[in-house]
Each structure stands twice: as C-alpha cells, then as structure tokens.
Image: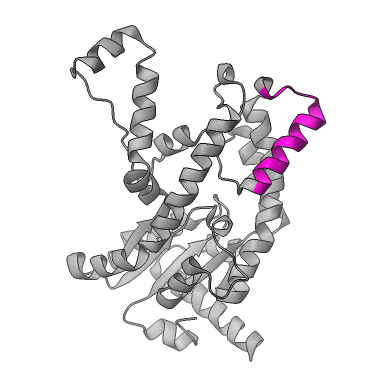
Amino acid sequence: MIFETAQEWRSAPEKRVALFGMSGLGKTHVSNILRRSGAWFHYSVDYRIGSRYLIEEINDNLKREAMKNPYLADLLRSDSIDITARLRFENLAPLSAWLGKPGNPARGGLQIGEYRHRQALHRNAEIAAMHDCPRFMARARALYGYPHFVCDTSGSFCEVVEPDDPQDPVLAQLSRNLLLVWIESGPEHGKKLTERFRRAPKPMYYPPALLDRLWKEYLAAGNVPEGDVDPDDFAVFAYRRALAARQPRYRAIAENWGLGVSADDIATVRDEADFVDVIARAITDVSRARA
C-alpha cells in the first residue's frame, strides 16, 4: 500500500484513493463529499468510459433510434438537427441505455449477439479509463491545484482485472499510485441491493464466461426461447448471481492490493475529516493483521 501507517496517511500532502465495490454502497456519494470539500479531484471511471471511450457508440445509437422516426430521419439527413448524449457525473443514463439488457427487442432488449458486442466494448473502455488515472492525477495537480485525488471506480472493476495475478497491469499501475479501498457489503447490504435492483433493474457488465453461463441457465430454467426473454426478468435473475460472484474477487483485490472498509463505516462519512478517520482506522487494522 502507498500509505503504510495511519500517521503516514493522515499527514500525506497528497492523499490518493480508489474506491471499489458494488454500485449503491457509497462510492460516488463519498467521492462527491470529498469533491465538495474543495481539495479533492473526483475522477469518475463511469463518466470517463461514457464521455471519452464510448461517446461515439452512444451517439450513433441515439441517431439509429431517431432514424426510425420518419420526421426525425429527414431532419438528421439534412443536418438540420443534432442528437447527442448529455452525460454528467450525476446522470449516466445515456451510457446505461446504450449498454442495455439482453432480451426481446419488442420489450426494450438487445439481441444477445449485439449485447455481447457492447459488453466487449465496455470492457475495453473500462480498462482504458482505469489506465487514465495517473494522467488525471497529474492534470488535477498541474491544472487545478488539487492536492488530493479520489478515483470512483465502476461496479464492474473487479471483472476486468485478475486479483491474484501480481503482474495484472491495471492493479499494478493503480496500486503504485493510489490506495485501493474496497467498500465491503455484508449479507444485509446484499439483500438491500438486490431488492433495489429488483425494483429498478439496470444494465450491467458481466465477464463473457459468466454471461454465457447465466444466459444458458436462464433459458433452461424457464424453457424460454432466446427471442422471448424479458430483459428485466433476466437482469434480476443474473444480478443475484453476479453479486455473489463478485464478492470473492473484490476481497482478493483488497487482500492482495489494498484494504477493505465496511459499508456501515462508509455510511458514517459526513465530511473529509470523517473519511480520513475511517481510512486511518482501516490502515491500522490491516497493518496489525499483516504484522
């Protein structure tokens, strides 16, 4: 870890952290608290994915949908209107809409082949966005004078790295520059996340092998033809299993490359001082455990 002791962390003139864990546990909330303190640069991986690496794909998809409307199609062909996504830190809906969910197109789904294609593009974009971290750390200091840096990772971060590989290029680069902090969920958090997802299913990234397994299991369990899949129903089916599959990967990253803090502790953070205290205690706990 780049901060070996709590005192080293507390006194560091440049505090640099990367928060990772399931979406909904407080990564972005805490990052916003730190940004509002005025001393932290907030680097959102999801925003970078959408605004830099997938923006053309997102905008082309919007135009493709608009071309289905004859009125809008004529205006687009004559270059009379422009249709572009408006991505913001607090609104990444265009990225989610582009990623989509597999299933019956009549129900808003994507054919599984197209879905796999978009998943592959998202994976490459996420890896590239993670590799951009050091450059943005330098920009944050040189351009804006921010002494501290928080990387707000995507929930699928654990799926695009190999936690047990000491040569993993993403983790090796990140750990040289930032303190990797896992926001750890317990059983009760998992239940709340699952219930929240059930009420409003969202697009997700799955590693190819897991997606193939879940897709086959879903089709077999319901004896559902591939073209009749309800996208939301599949998303809920897959979420519970993806959540369970991610936990050991998150844990391995924390144990091999950083540390973990409980989601309950993160929920107590109200300002920068609270955050510094939570991380200091976690560093002390890890140092004792590894002594």
User: Which residue is found at the position 30% from the left and 13% from the top?
Assistant: 73
| Span highlighted in magenta in the image | 209-226
Total marks shown come to 0
Q: Quadrant of the C terminus?
A: bottom right
Q: Is residue 221 magenta?
A: yes
Give the residue furthest to the top: 70
Residue 192 can be seen in this image: no
In this picture, is 266 found above or below 91? below
At 40% from the left and 56% from the top, the residue drawn is 128
Q: Main secondary structure of the magenta part?
A: helix
Q: Is residue 89 left or right of residue 161?
A: left
Q: Position of residue 39 (x, y in %)?
A: 29, 68
What residue is at 25 percent from the left and 66 percent from the top? 140
Residue extending farthest to the bottom is 291
47 or 62: nearer the viewer: 62
User: Does residue 149 show up?
Assistant: yes
Q: Quadrant of residue 213?
A: top right
Q: Give the image quarter of residue 252.
A: bottom right
Q: Position of residue 7 (x, y in %)?
A: 45, 88
Q: Position of residue 186 (x, y in %)?
A: 69, 59
Out of 102 and 264, give the one closest to the viewer. Answer: 102
